[in-house]
Amino acid sequence: MKQALPYVLAVGVTGAVCFFGVEPIGRDDSHFWRMVLAGVSIGLLWILWWVRRNNADGRALTAVRVALVAACTMGWFNYFQFDRDVLLGINDYTDSSYYYTNSKYLKELSYTGLYSSALLCDRERGSPRTKEIRQVRDLRDYELVSVPQALRHGEQVKADFSAARWAAYCHDITFFMDRLSRKALRTNWFVDHGYNPPPTWSLLGGNLATLLPVEHLKAACSVDAVLVLAMFIAIAWAFGVDVTLLAMLFWVTTFSGRWPILGQAILRFDWVVALVAAVAFLKKDRPASAGAAFAFAACNRVFPAIFFLGWGLTFLFDLVQERRVSRRHARFLTAAAVVTVMMSGAALLQYGPDTLRRSAENLRMHNETYSSHRVGLGDVLVYRGERDRDDIRASCMELDHGTECGIYGKELKIRTWQWRLRFAGLLAIGFVGLYAWRTREADWELIGLAVLPFFCMTNPQINYYNLRVLLFMWHGAHLDKPAHRGLMSLLLLVEVATQATKVVGVERYLTTTTTSYGMLLYLVVLCAWMVRRMLR
């Protein structure tokens, strides 16, 4: 208890200063402090290493950890903008409106009926929120259509509802439309890309939404906060307090945490929590738990399946060397298979095979889209130095059929490069495999390296890059090695640069592209270090 006292005091004093001494700030101001904290974090990790290396007395190490705890505490207050309403309320209903309603009524809405049915619900009560709507995205093909066309589709969607279910759905969706601004409805909500998680996620999110009425939305959104708390406990259990504090500093400073805010969305963080838990379980030699956690992440978001790569390589090498499946790998495989069968089977029973087929079609179509929120190699290749919306609209791409300008032109260009990006991803997988074969690192050491093919093959929204917490766990476990300190510092410098773009007020596109270029630099340095290790 006495040993914990300095850390409790650090939390208490820093929290009291933040709570009583700092007024609520806007989101843009929070980016300034995220930038500052990311820079401070670089200094703290080097000080931590120096103190540990020189065998300084316990008081020096305690002082550094107290500083880390204070920085994390301040980071959490800044994350919620020093604002009680942001912490306890929901100031952006867009994400939760998609995830709550479409998962709850997935059987009737499928992946194409959300916008048209929402428009019809509002029309049936006199259109108090949608009179200004002129265009709606048709989620069947992502084309923009007129309101009359959308309403006709809405009538078709309504035919799949019973009268009681339609009344319940309209009650829920109008709850959100009444809280979204008219500007948000007109410029964003009805023209976004709707609801995209697979039915295996809907199995959890939809039943949670069914269990909790929409009036208790905050309770549903708070589940993520409990999961993230469990994630940091898992890191502490497997990697220790120092790695946990460094990972937490990344979490509260990364631009990937700008949206959605923790506690304001439904099960948006379950997949990354599962990935982190899987690595922790592997580190502590709990292969069955690791397999179950990996399978859960992959079933919920599909793309986390690529992070099976690290374990898969060690499985392959051990199989070739021992000519049998070891007990450890058998336990991993069995648990992963059980979770996959259970989740897929339950989703099939609840929603039917047609919903699973439509999910695959929707995912394929969604993956072909591009926006100013995306990060990846494709984003790097289509960037032409744009700084604002006028630059983006004027930026044109040469295509086989002619020239296309704006974001849509970039989307079409990335589509033409898909086979090249996939090939680059396969080369990256081969490179990671060669590194794993030469070094024979433990499977938990290799998990984070899947970020290399992930960056090459995909262009997800920037919020999915909170998965870089896996890299902080890996680097933090080797803080005594200069390469790992340097690479962790580079990841934090990416956040300093990314947040700086918001501080100076540039368009979001330049902000996310800064992360793309930063990650490209990080991965180039990482690959150079991997080559050096293999040669040695």
Image (spheres, rainbow, N blue to C red):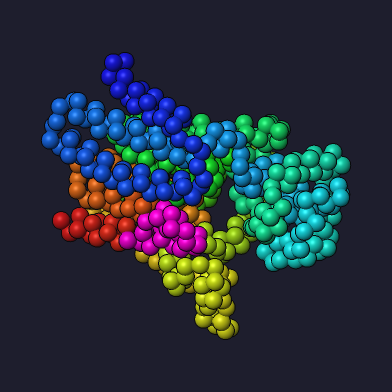
For residue 404, above or below residue 473: below
Q: Residue furthest top?
A: 1
Above or below residue 76? Residue 383 is below
Magenta span contains residue 506? yes
Residue at the image position 47 percent from the left and 67 percent from the top = 387
Residue 199 lies, in percent from the top left, at: 63, 46
Residue 49: x %, y % from top left: 20, 39
Q: Residue at point 38% right, 62% down?
A: 517
> Would residue 65 appear left or right of 197 to someone viewing this image?
left
Vertical placement of 339 versus 514: above or below? above
How far from the left and from the top, in percent, is residue 362?
64, 58
Whether residue 138 is visible:
no
Identify which residue, 41 or 307, lies in the foreground: 41
Can residue 172 be seen here? The reply is yes
Decide which of 171, 290 is in the foreground and name it.
Answer: 171
Q: Is residue 45 left or right of residue 110?
A: left
Q: Quadrant of residue 423?
A: bottom left
Q: Residue at x 19, y 29 (%)?
A: 60
> For the magenta stretch, what is the residue range?
497-521
For the N terminus, the quadrant is top left
Q: Position of residue 478 (x, y in %)?
A: 24, 42
**Left or right relative to 237: residue 151:** right
- Prevailing SS of the magenta stretch: helix
Between 499 and 522, which is closer to the camera in this rendering?
499
Q: Is residue 142 above or below residue 448?
A: below
Pick the front one: 3 or 267: 3
529 in magenta: no
